[in-house]
Image (cartoon, rainbow, N blue to C red):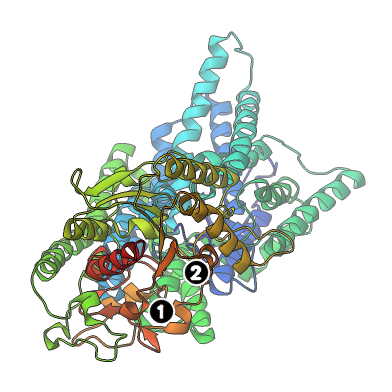
């Protein structure tokens, strides 16, 4: 989750210096061809904001909008370059253009990826190798933004830990812009000529094209931010308008101001842009839907600075040596700072301190200076490099890409081998008669079961735990209103027919339900929905559309129960920490939770169907898997969660059952998860959680005998 503002605590890192020339020149805006020091200063401002945000997010909540500033700069510089070539020659040398981009971007990017990849192997736990290996590959081939967009809507990936390659999402968007813009410009010019508009200048064609892209992309950005914010943040389609606006600015040749009025307009325009950028740092926070309409604040601000900043007070500011040098190395600063933010806590095994953060900031600038002065600029400026033909550059780029990708592939292979071995071991333990395995340790009882053979066992392996999930598509409505039901146990000849309904915490138990049904000779139907459970209360979600979908699914669920009065019991469970209810005015959260449960459960009890509520499992710390993967030897309590924290969220099942009377029951297995003080990360040799709120399938299956016995007792009470 999507991560990563860092993954979910903050969105991912900002964008990069797109053009790379130390002295930024733009003849359309500066007739003398002089250096655009204001743009260099804008780069320095943007990268500094991004770095400060990632180190001190509470101090600079809107620093992540440095992304948008760089996207505007990219659109301005690259569009201006392509238009000058089109005006002069009537064509665009695609090979030469892409070669320059490769010489500029690949040396620094690949250096960072390789060094970071090696650091991952040295300091990161194996549990992260699989995810981070995939992201290393995605970053290398410039599709990281789409990898993160897919993770944002993948339920199993929403709890992914921010990777040290996550910041390459913006580089990927930039690279896709570099590929798409010249092709679009050439296509638009070709169309204009085919329509007998031979007299149309390339700059006119570009204005029409970029205007259409800006309007269409901005409209899509606003809509997508409302309906799928995770995808909207990373999508090239929702970011294209930012590049387009910068490109449109490059088509406005203001020239040197000749009058006092013109100079005043320049000054007011440039400083208005600065004011908008400064406001964005404070007004836009990680809780503001983004990019959406809010992105207009930094984008318009950056556009005003670029448009009006060529002559005036911003030029001297950009010439100040530290500012100019920061702008010069901004690309490398961006590349190096984020891996350090992610990896330093893993290496030191503690959260970043103020001293750590200062060291990261200083170290990033030092590494950036070294990379820029000794790697990027020498390679880009070397005579042999400039003489390379595009085909040769493409060949060397492909070879380097393959070599870097192989590093990611090696981490994926190593992680996969360990996962297969751990899964085989877990199956052998689960299917054998291993005393005290998992929930059988009964850690909350007066005399817990202890098996010395399990003292150093931790299954599934942390690297495989995230995928240790029992859910099945036939039982899962995901994000649709369709009420999908699957069946486990006996199809005929069953003694009890039960329906288990809820959100993902219900479907975590699919394999456990199957074991229960087979043991007792029952039929259990299972129906689950993403972040949506059996309640009449409205639940909060990322978008209004998902709230409406959830409401409809719940209506369909109640209709299904009413149409099956022959059910012998309704099993219900829900996550206490995800998708909280919307509290109406004059009520409280706890009262709203209980009222919603009672309203939905009455659908069954009014028909004489008993409701059996399974109290939600305790939660774990966010870094539990990483912590467990760093263990060696005997399992310790270093990764355990205090009981008060694990059970902090209000469940409401007990209160709802009390209001409904004898047809409502609560099954609470907390004693199998927790002692009087803590809820361990590993119980009876089994890793309990695959993410902060979901159980591993391995542990869930060990709960089956206890759930089965409790459910059977509740069913017997109908006649008792």
In terms of image quadrants, where is residue 592?
A: bottom right
Q: Is residue 130 above or below residue 94?
A: below
Quarter occupied by the C terminus: bottom left
Reply above or below: 451 against 537.
Answer: below
Residue 444's tag is none
Question: Which residue reaches farthest right?
Answer: 260
582 and 216: which is toward the camera: 582
Q: Residue furthest bottom?
A: 446
Measured as percent of width and height from the top left, residue 296 is found at 69, 47
Q: Residue at x 36, y 65 (%)?
A: 694
Residue appearing at x 65%, y 45% in the figure = 33
Looking at the image, can residue 473 be seen?
Answer: no
Residue bearing the label numbered 2: 651
Camera-side residue: 57 or 44? Answer: 57
Residue depth check, mark 1 versus mark 2: number of the one nearer the observer: 2
Give me the C-alpha separation between circle 1 and circle 2.
Answer: 34 Å
User: In terms of sequence position, does the residue under pointer 1 or pointer 2 come before the other?
Assistant: 1
Image spot of residue 509 (x, y percent): 30, 60
User: Circle 1 — which element?
Assistant: helix
Instruction: Identify the image quadrant of residue 221.
Output: top right
For this orientation, the residue located farthest to the front is 720
192 displayed left or right of 572:
right
Looking at the image, residue 247 lies above or below residue 426: above
Secondary structure found at label 2: loop
**Is residue 139 in sight in this rendering?**
yes
x and y percentages locating residue 124 in the rendered image: 30, 73
Q: Residues within 10 Å of mark 2 (few under 14, many from 20)?
A: many
Q: Going 67% across and 34% down the picture, which residue do you hit?
A: 251
Classify residue 80 as left or right of residue 383.
Answer: right
Which residue, given by chain and number where applicable, does mark 1 sit on? 345
Asked if the residues shown at circle 1 and circle 2 are in contact, with their CB atoms under 8 angstroms apart, the answer is no
């Amino acid at each position: 989750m999507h991560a990563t503002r860092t993954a979910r605590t903050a969105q991912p890192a900002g964008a990069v210096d797109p053009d790379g020339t130390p002295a930024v020149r733009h003849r359309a805006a500066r007739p003398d061809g002089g250096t655009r020091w204001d743009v260099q200063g804008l780069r320095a401002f943007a990268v500094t904001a991004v770095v400060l945000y990632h180190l001190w997010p509470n101090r600079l909540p809107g620093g992540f909008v440095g992304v948008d500033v760089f996207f505007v700069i990219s659109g301005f510089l690259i569009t201006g370059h392509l238009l000058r070539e089109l005006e002069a020659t009537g064509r665009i040398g695609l090979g030469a253009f892409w070669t320059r981009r490769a010489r500029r971007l690949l040396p620094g990017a690949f250096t960072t990826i390789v060094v970071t990849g090696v650091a991952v192997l040295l300091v990161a736990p194996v549990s992260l190798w699989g995810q981070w290996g995939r992201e290393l590959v995605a970053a290398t081939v410039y599709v990281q933004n789409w990898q993160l967009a897919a993770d944002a809507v993948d339920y199993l990936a929403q709890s992914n830990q921010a990777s040290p390659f996550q910041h390459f999402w913006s580089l990927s968007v930039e690279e896709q812009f570099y590929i798409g813009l010249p092709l679009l410009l050439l296509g638009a010019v070709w169309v204009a000529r085919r329509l007998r508009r031979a007299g149309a200048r390339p700059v006119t064609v570009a204005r029409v094209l970029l205007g259409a892209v800006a309007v269409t992309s901005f409209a899509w950005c606003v809509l997508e931010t409302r309906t799928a914010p995770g995808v909207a943040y990373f999508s090239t389609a929702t970011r294209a308008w930012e590049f387009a606006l910068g490109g449109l600015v490059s088509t406005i040749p203001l020239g040197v101001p000749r009058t006092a009025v013109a100079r005043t307009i320049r000054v007011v325009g440039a400083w208005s842009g600065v004011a908008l950028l400064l406001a964005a740092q404070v007004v836009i926070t990680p809780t503001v839907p983004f990019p959406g309409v809010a992105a207009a604040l930094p984008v318009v601000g950056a556009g005003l600075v670029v448009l009006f900043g060529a002559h005036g007070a911003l030029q001297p500011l950009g010439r100040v040596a530290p500012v100019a040098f920061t702008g010069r190395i901004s690309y490398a600063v961006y590349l190096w700072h984020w891996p350090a933010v992610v990896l330093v806590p893993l290496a030191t095994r503690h959260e970043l301190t103020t001293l750590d953060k200062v060291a990261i900031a200083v170290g990033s600038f030092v590494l950036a200076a070294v990379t820029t002065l000794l790697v990027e600029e020498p390679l880009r400026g070397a005579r042999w490099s400039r003489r390379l033909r595009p085909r040769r550059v493409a060949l060397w780029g492909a070879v380097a890409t393959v070599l870097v990708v192989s590093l990611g592939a090696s981490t994926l292979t190593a992680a996969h081998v360990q996962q297969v071995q751990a899964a085989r071991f877990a199956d052998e333990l689960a299917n054998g008669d291993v005393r005290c395995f998992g929930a059988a340790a009964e850690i909350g009882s007066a005399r817990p079961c202890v098996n010395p053979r399990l003292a150093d066992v931790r299954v599934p392996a942390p690297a495989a735990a995230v995928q240790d999930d029992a859910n099945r598509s036939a039982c899962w409505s995901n994000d649709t209103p369709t009420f999908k039901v699957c069946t486990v146990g006996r199809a005929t000849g069953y003694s009890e027919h039960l329906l288990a309904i809820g959100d993902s915490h219900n479907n975590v138990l699919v394999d456990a339900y199957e074991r229960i049904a087979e043991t007792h000779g029952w039929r259990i139907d299972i129906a689950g929905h993403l972040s949506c459970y059996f309640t009449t209360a409205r639940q909060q979600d990322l978008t209004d559309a998902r709230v409406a979908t959830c409401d409809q699914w719940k209506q369909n669920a109640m209709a299904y129960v009413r149409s099956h009065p022959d059910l012998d019991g309704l099993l219900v469970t829900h996550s206490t920490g995800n998708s909280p209810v919307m509290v109406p005015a004059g009520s409280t959260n706890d009262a709203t939770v209980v009222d919603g449960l009672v309203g939905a459960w009455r659908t069954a009890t009014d028909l004489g169907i008993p409701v059996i509520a399974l109290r939600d499992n305790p939660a774990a710390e966010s870094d539990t898997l990483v912590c467990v993967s760093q263990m060696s030897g005997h399992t310790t309590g270093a990764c355990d969660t205090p009981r008060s924290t694990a059970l902090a969220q209000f469940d409401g099942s007990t209160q709802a059952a009390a209001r409904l009377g004898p047809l409502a029951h609560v099954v609470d297995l907390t004693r199998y998860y927790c002692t009087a003080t803590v809820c361990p990360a590993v119980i009876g040799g089994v890793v309990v959680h695959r993410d902060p709120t979901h159980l591993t399938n391995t542990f869930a299956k060990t709960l089956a005998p206890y759930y089965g016995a409790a459910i059977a007792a509740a069913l017997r009470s109908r006649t008792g």
